[in-house]
Amino acid sequence: MSNELIVGIEGGGTSYKVAIGLNIEHAMENVFITETKTVDETMEPIKQFLIKKESELGGIIKRIGIANFGPIDVNVGCILPSTPKVSWRSFNIVEYFKREFPQVKHVQFDTDVNGPAMAEYQLVKGSGIKSLAYVTIGTGIGVGLVINGSTVSGLMHPEAGHIYTPLHPRDMETGFKGFCTFHTEGCLEGMAASPSIVKRRNISIHDVKSISDDDEIWDIEAHYLAHLCVNLILISSCQVIVMGGGIMNRSILFDKIREKTVQLLNGYHVMINNESIKNIIKPSVYGEHAGIKGALHLSQL
């Protein structure tokens, strides 16, 4: 009897990462990355990689977890028509893999932030943690939620990157309104994702990493991201907020966000103070591997 293999697929806006193996640890030894292009140009090399690895590993793919860029329809298994990636509009990625690998008995499909949220949750669920949020801040802002062991979805999936937040005084002074094409003035993603820094400073995205730690821009970032944390705490009562993505490589942001979050709550939440907040707002344990780890964990659901 052939070994049963699991597959994790992390679908990002710039690249797709695929892992295959007997279990999560083994799958992390067999990883393939391809650039996100059109559907056909992206799916074909992934399919060929999986076919090749099935043969090499002497197994059959039985379970697939997909953590994909959005917006998506979690229940149907497709990318929604509102994606700016034209060829991906309405593409049903779940049906694609069921068709190409008919022996697969389960495909679990979720967002590229709910996947990492599930991976991070698996590390803490035995310690009494029932709720966790995963936030990624890069070219956009995404939020995944796990509550009582399940990722959250409903009308769609969490889109907390597009909540409205009070403007930072400097933005009020300069009239900066963000870059979100759907929402003007106060949309979190438009005000705090990396293109907002680029737009404020009129620099290249590659120059963001050269901005000094003492620059005011990081206080502005902390202002908006702390408002997100306050909303997550008050609405979902999440016990842990994991923060990752390119912007959070700027490690000074953690203390700034923690301090501002406590300040905004202003004593209202009796469980949160300057000490406890350190165990609530945290960096990702998995770092850049959070997405693919999340996809592999989804395959186990």
Image: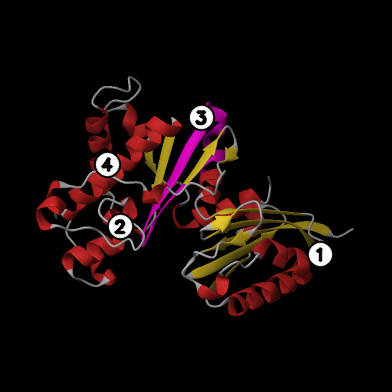
Q: Earlier in the sequence, mark 1 or mark 3?
A: 1
Q: Which residue is mark 3?
A: 129
Could you tell me how many numbered marks the image carries? 4
Q: Label 1 neighbourhood size at 10 Å, few (<14), some (14-19), many (20+)?
A: few
Q: CA distance from mark 2 to mark 3?
A: 31 Å
For disc 4, the marked residue is 257
SS category of the residue bearing label 2 = helix
| Residue 130 located within the stretch drawn in magenta | yes
* Residues under numbered marks 1 and 3 in contact, where contact means CB atoms less than 8 Å apart: no
Tell me the distance, in whole angstroms, between the alpha carbons under discs 4 and 1.
47 Å
Q: What whole-number distance in Å separates the C-alpha atoms at marks 2 and 4?
A: 18 Å
Few, some or many residues within 10 Å of mark 4 (<14, 14–19, 20+): many
Q: Position of residue 122 (x, y in %)?
A: 57, 40
- Name the residue at the left extreme: 173
Q: Could you say which is closer to the camera, residue 268 or residue 154?
A: 154
Q: Is residue 159 left or right of residue 226?
A: right
Q: Label 4, secondary structure: give it.
A: helix
At 51% from the left and 43% from the top, the residue drawn is: 120
Could you tell me the amino acid type at mark 3?
Ile
What is the span of residues highlighted in magenta in the rendered image? 120-143
Residue, disc 2: 190
Viewer-nearest of discs 2 and 3? 2
Amino acid under disc 4: Ile
Q: Earlier in the sequence, mark 4 or mark 1?
A: 1
Residues tagged 4 and 1 counted as in contact (Cβ below 8 A): no
Residue at point 70% right, 70% down?
50
Q: Which kind of residue does numbered mark 1 sit on? A: Pro
Task: Give the structural element (helix, strand or loop) at label 1.
Answer: loop
Q: Quadrant of the N terminus?
A: bottom right
**Residue marked by disc 1:** 102
